[in-house]
Structure formats: C-alpha cells, structure tokens
C-alpha cells in the first residue's frame, strides 16, 4: 500500500485554496467515520446544526484522513501521529470533541479509555464541554452514553468504553492505557519542563494497541517556540517538506509561505484565509482586519501575540515597549551562512572578549567581538554555560535551555568550575592566535574567572573590569548604531535572539540602563557579555597581527621586487 504524508507544494496549495490534507488510504473506513461525525450536533450554534451543515470541507478531509488510515484487515493504524497547526477560533475544540466522540462510537474494544490531554483545567473544560453537549443534544447518544461532569468523563453504558478529559496541571496521567489520544494546545506544553515524560505516560498504552493514534492540536505560541512544541513543529515541517520520510506522521500546518512572511503579506486582509481555513464561518475577516488595525499601533508585544494566535506568525524577538532598541535590528544582522567561533578568529584582525554572570541561578555568558580584516565589520559570537540546578530553579525556562543546548549555544555543566575552565580555554585560543586585545568582565563576579584565566596563561594586564549600570550606556548605544547601519554581524544564534528580546530598558537621566533586575527572571547574561566586549572594541584597539602585518610585509615586499 503506497501513501505519502509529504506535501512539498504546500505553499502553492494554500495560496490557491487547495487542500493540504492527503486523501484517505482506506476510503470505506473514512466514509464510515465521516457519516458518524457529520451527524453530531453543535449545541452552541443557533438551531444546534449538524456537523454536516456547519463545517467546511477541510474539516471533513481531516476526519477522512484520520479514520481512513485504519486497515480493518490487519487492525493497524498506518498513520499514527497527526499534528494540526491552525489559527485561533477555527473551531479547534469543536473538531476535537467530534473526532474523539466518533472514535468512541467506533471503538470495537471494551473497557477502552480514550483521552484528551489538556495543559490546564480551563482548556480541559473547553474540550470536555463541547463533547458532553454533543451527547446531550442527541437522544440516541444520550441513551448510549453516561456523562460524569465532575470527572470530565463520558462512558458507553454497554461496552464501558470511555472518553476522559485530563488537565495536566491538576490530574495525573500516570498509568494511562489509551489507544487514541488527543493533545490540545501543544504550544502550552512547550513551556513545561516535564511535558516529554507526561507524553510518554499518556501515550504508553499505544505500545499494545496497533489501532491507536495521537492527534496534536495547537495554535502558534505567544512566545518563541520552545520544548516539545518546537521539537514537534520542526519535525512536522521536515516531514511535510519531504526532508524526512515518515509515513506514520502527518503534519497539517496552516502557516504563511516564507516569501509572504518576508513581504509582510500576512497583514493584508485578502490573505487571512491562508491560516484560517474556516474564514467566513467561525472566523470573520472583517473582525481580524479591525483588530489588526488596533494592534498595529501597540508597542507592548500585543501585535506579535495577535499575529501568532490569529495568523500563525511565529514569534521571534519579543519586542515590547520597554525593549532594547537594538533588538529591532538584531535578526536582520545574522550572517547568512552563520558564524562560528573558529570563523570569527579566522576573519578577525583583533578580538575583544566579554564575560558576565555565572551564579548557580544564572547563566555564564561569553562573547567574542572581532573586527573583520577586510570589511571592518564587527563580528560577534556568544556562548553560555549553566549548571543543571538552573533547570530546577527556573522550570519555566528549562525547555528553552534544553533547546539552546541542543543547538550548541548553551553547555550544561555537571561540575561547578567546568564553565569557567571552558571560558578560559576559549580566551586562550584567541590569545594563541595573536588576536586578543582585552577581556572585559563584570567586576562583581571576577574571582573564579580571574583564577581560571591566570591558569590559562592570560596576562593580567589584559583583564579589565567593565563598570556596569549607566557606565555601560556607551556600549549599548554603540551596539544599537552598529546593528542599524549594518556594521555588526553575528551568528544568528537562537539563544542570543532570545536574550535580546528579554532585555528591558530603564531610563536613568540622560542614559539608559539594561540590567538583570529590569529584565526580571528572563536571562540576558550573554547579551551583557557582548556589551562588555563591545565596550572594549569600540575603543578601536590596534591589531596585534593579521592585516596590519600583511599590508606592511606585502606592500614593502612589492616595492622591493620592483626596484
């Protein structure tokens, strides 16, 4: 049996209003389930219409695809994981209720539990209430099922099969043996440090149930994607684009083509349909346009959140009203091919280093800022270290830190002291290349770093304490200008983009402050390290080797050869 879950021409299909959902593998199974689904009623709409009368065709295609992947002869579900990324207000909860009720009606097992896993009690209630209302709206279903609102459970009176809605923040998912699972609002789970283990518990029952499947429903995150959400979204995109061959996984992602994002075509009302397939039904294009106009004047981040939720525009930097001005230009100044530490050394004529942070509740930030031999552009590369205790102390950020570690931007050290040793080794590499001008450090945390640098052979006179607070104003302003004029290039590291988005500006007389206190729990240590390095590089240090020597030797050599 041949089928594919890839959709490499998804951009063209979405723009042309064509389906991005593959046809069912087994048409008879698909139509059987669809007929049940269509007969379910939607009580919160006037007249309690049937699904058949109020849903768009894309919903029916989704139902066909899920139930049409079941091979009745072998009892195997051929597509086991479905991911649906869709904008807010596209009847996601109603669809979830209808699909799970259909699965419950079709279940041939006895004493089988179907599960909807929601991140919070409120989301769980939003998922359970439509399902319960569908049962109550139909006399036949009311006779067939028993509803227990207090434990959010719907049970078949004859087979004892059930549909249970579980809130991850209050209910336990341990020991679940559900064959069919729906996970609602995956983006919220992306912020939880224990989401991976929670899913392992919830999906454990599928090992012995070859007819099982899991559906992940989600909108875009109101923060840069992290944790399991980021991991799943990236994998679904790769399967969709044909980069990964996985016929058991299907990602149905309503998102704008890259070119339309770059052109900001998503701001035009005629394009709202791309991530809102239910536009004209549960979604009003006029309302979206009016709300977008209101949000476009906002500078507190509400525009980005509106775009994420209603148009599935992935949030990059968190640009709020008290944001650092340089954050607006940061992403645009990423080197197209990236920038590694080794490349920075190869391209630079002189390098300054900045170091910041390093407590148990902190990241230790490192930044190397070099001046390009040929273009004179400033090159910035950063890294950070963290002790695993930070993952416990900052559980809300633990998934993000693990992402950064996976990208290679963050190192999780097992032993206190390993971080400063790594920093000293990087500084020693710059010194060995004959490029090191100075090392700028926060004077308040200089002890262990001084010792490590001394052991690495870094001359004491090259280590400078960089005054923080208002005295760092010059470096902050210089960095802003360099970014805006295109004179600073960096490696495009996700961790650093996050730090720039975290930076909060506090006016102080004629200066501005960017401090850890103003940024709250959000981490900015690598950015502060970059300011330390740039404060030294802005002094226009003399190149110790490289281009100056090359020009001198080359120029006089040419004179000698021509004379």
Image: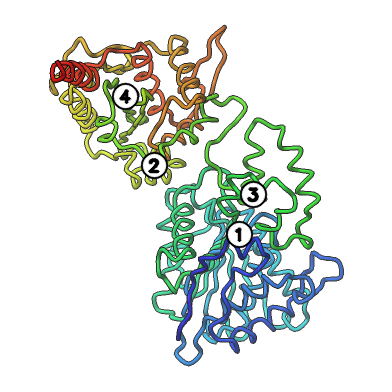
Tell me which numbered mark, 1 or 2, is placed earlier along the sequence.
1
Q: Residues within 10 Å of mark 3 (few under 14, many from 20)?
A: many
The residues bearing labels 2 and 4 have C-alpha atoms spaced at a distance of 26 Å
Mark 2 or mark 4, which is nearer to you? Answer: 4
Residue for point 13% across, 16% down = 560
Tell me which numbered mark, 3 or 4, is placed earlier along the sequence.
3
Q: Which residue is mark 3?
A: 309
The reply to whether discs 3 and 1 touch (Cβ–Cβ < 8 Å) is no
Q: Residue 401 got which mark?
A: 2
For the N terminus, the quadrant is bottom left
Q: Secondary structure under badge 1?
A: loop
The residues bearing labels 1 and 2 have C-alpha atoms spaced at a distance of 28 Å
Q: Residue 254 got which mark?
A: 1
- Judge left or right: residue 37 versus residue 242: right
Please determine whether, in this image, residue 391 is positioned above or below residue 219: above
Residue 541 at least partly seen: yes
Q: Which residue is mark 4?
A: 370
Q: Quadrant of residue 448?
A: top left
């Amino acid at each position: 049996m041949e089928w594919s879950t890839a959709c490499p021409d998804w951009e063209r299909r979405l723009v042309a209003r064509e389906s991005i959902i593959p046809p069912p593998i087994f048409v008879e199974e698909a139509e059987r389930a669809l007929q049940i689904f269509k007969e379910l009623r939607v009580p919160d709409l006037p007249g309690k219409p049937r699904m058949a009368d109020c849903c768009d065709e894309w919903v029916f295609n989704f139902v066909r695809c899920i139930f049409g992947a079941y091979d009745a002869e072998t009892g195997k579900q051929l597509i086991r994981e479905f991911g649906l990324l869709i904008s807010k207000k596209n009847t996601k909860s109603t669809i979830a209720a209808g699909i799970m009720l259909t699965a419950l009606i079709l279940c041939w097992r006895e004493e089988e539990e179907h599960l909807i896993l929601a991140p919070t009690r409120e989301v769980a209630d939003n998922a359970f209430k439509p399902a319960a209302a569908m049962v109550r709206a139909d006399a036949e279903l009311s006779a067939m099922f028993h509803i227990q609102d207090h434990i959010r459970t719907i049970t078949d009176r004859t087979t004892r099969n059930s549909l249970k809605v579980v809130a991850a923040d209050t209910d336990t998912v341990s020991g679940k043996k559900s064959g069919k699972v729906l996970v609602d609002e995956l983006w919220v789970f992306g912020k939880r440090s224990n989401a991976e283990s929670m899913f392992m518990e919830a999906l454990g029952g599928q090992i012995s149930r070859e007819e099982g499947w899991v559906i992940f429903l989600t909108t875009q995150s109101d923060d840069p994607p992290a944790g399991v959400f980021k991991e799943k979204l990236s994998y679904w995109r790769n399967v969709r684009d044909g980069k990964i061959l996985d016929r058991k996984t299907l990602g149905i992602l309503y998102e704008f083509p890259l070119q339309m994002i770059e052109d900001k075509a998503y701001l035009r009302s005629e394009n709202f349909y791309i991530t809102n397939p239910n536009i004209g039904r549960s979604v009003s294009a006029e309302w979206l346009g009016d709300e977008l106009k209101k949000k476009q004047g906002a500078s507190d981040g509400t525009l980005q959140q509106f775009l994420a939720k209603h148009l599935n525009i992935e949030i990059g930097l968190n640009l709020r009203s008290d944001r650092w001005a340089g954050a607006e230009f940061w992403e645009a100044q990423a080197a197209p091919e990236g920038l590694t530490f080794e490349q920075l050394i190869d391209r630079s004529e002189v390098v300054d280093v900045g170091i910041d942070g390093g407590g148990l509740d902190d990241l230790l930030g490192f930044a190397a800022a070099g001046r390009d031999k040929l273009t004179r552009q400033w090159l910035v590369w950063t890294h950070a270290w963290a002790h695993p205790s930070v993952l416990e102390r900052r559980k809300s950020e633990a998934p993000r830190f693990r992402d950064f570690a996976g990208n290679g931007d963050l190192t999780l050290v097992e032993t206190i002291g390993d971080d400063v040793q790594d920093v000293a080794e990087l500084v020693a590499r710059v010194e060995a290349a004959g490029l090191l001008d100075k090392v700028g450090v926060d004077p308040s945390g200089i002890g262990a770093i001084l010792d490590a640098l001394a052991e690495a052979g870094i001359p004491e006179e090259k280590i400078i304490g960089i005054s923080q607070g208002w005295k760092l104003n010059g470096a902050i302003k210089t960095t802003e200008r360099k970014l805006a004029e295109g004179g600073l290039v960096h490696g495009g590291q996700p961790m650093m983009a996050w730090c720039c988005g975290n930076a909060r500006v506090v006016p102080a007389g004629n200066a501005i402050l960017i401090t850890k206190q103003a940024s709250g729990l959000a981490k900015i240590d690598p950015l502060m390290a970059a300011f330390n390095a740039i404060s030294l590089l802005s002094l226009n240090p003399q190149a110790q080797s490289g281009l100056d020597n090359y020009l001198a030797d080359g120029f006089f050599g040419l004179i000698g050869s021509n004379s």
